[in-house]
Image (cartoon, rainbow, N blue to C red):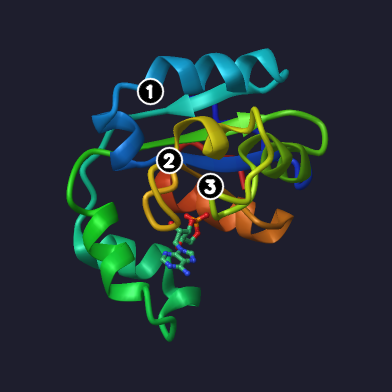
Amino acid sequence: MAKIDIFPGNFTLSIIKPDAIENGYISNILIKIMDDGFKITAIKTITSSKKSMIKFYEIHEKKSFFNSLINFMSSAPIIPMILKKKNAVKDFRKLIGNTNPLIAKKGTIRNLYATSLEKNAIHGSDNNSNAIRECKFFFPNLLSL
Ligand code: CMP
């Protein structure tokens, strides 16, 4: 099977989170992403185990919100996707806005669709090496790297 060629800098990993799915925002969010010039290269709906989310968010292990975040992200379906665009990581973080929806700029995905600091609608990789790690995490058999 042909694999996806990942070039650092041109890909990012996003997850539509349970709150946004529950609130009926899947299509609004996908349209915002495509209108901003991103190509959706891979996408799936899954319900993640706690164990898997603990691994995914391991860099936040010591944070006070860690247990709550893990419970939230494994409580209901999520939609991970690989997004392709030049300067994907930086451009996508601009599109989704600040982690805190109260601070996120007007018109950003979190400003429009997030529920709270934890239930903030969407995830985006924070740098190129994490983007590769996170794309591999959810789509291990699709990538050429
Ligand atoms: P995300 O971009 O997925 O990366 C880590 C997640 O932890 C973040 O979005 C939020 O869902 C959550 N998070 C970050 N900071 C806090 C906080 N102070 N309180 C609760 N949840 C947080």
Provide the secondary structure element on which disc 2 rests: loop
Per the image, the residue denoted by label 2 is 121
Q: Are marks 1 and 2 in contact (CB under 8 Å)?
A: yes
Query: Residue 73 at what x, y percent from top left?
Result: 29, 53
Q: Earlier in the sequence, mark 3 or mark 1?
A: 1
Q: Quick one: SS at disc 3?
A: loop
Report helix, strand or loop for mark 1. loop
Label 1 or label 2, whichever comes before in sequence order: 1
Q: Nearer the viewer, residue 116 or 5?
A: 116
The amino acid on which the numbered mark 3 sits, given as a three-letter code, is Pro
Q: Is residue 34 above or below residue 66?
A: above
Q: Is residue 11 visible?
A: yes
53 on left or right of 83: left
Q: Position of residue 135 (x, y in %)?
A: 53, 46
Residue farthest to the bottom? 62
In this rendering, position of residue 1 left or right of residue 11:
left
Report, in whole angstroms, how far the alpha carbon at label 3 lies from the one at label 2.
9 Å
Q: Which residue is mark 1?
A: 25
6 sits to left or right of 61: right
Q: Nearer the viewer, residue 25 or 39?
A: 25
The answer, for residue 141, to whether it is visible in the render is no
Q: Which residue is drawn at the image coordinates 55% and 31% (left, top)?
A: 3
Q: Amino acid at mark 2?
A: Ala
Res. 117 mark: none
Residue at x-position 67% and y-position 23%: 38
Residue flagged by tag 1: what amino acid is it?
Answer: Tyr
Query: In this figure, which residue is indicated by the disc labeled 3?
Result: 101
Label 3 and label 1: CA atoms lie apart by 15 Å
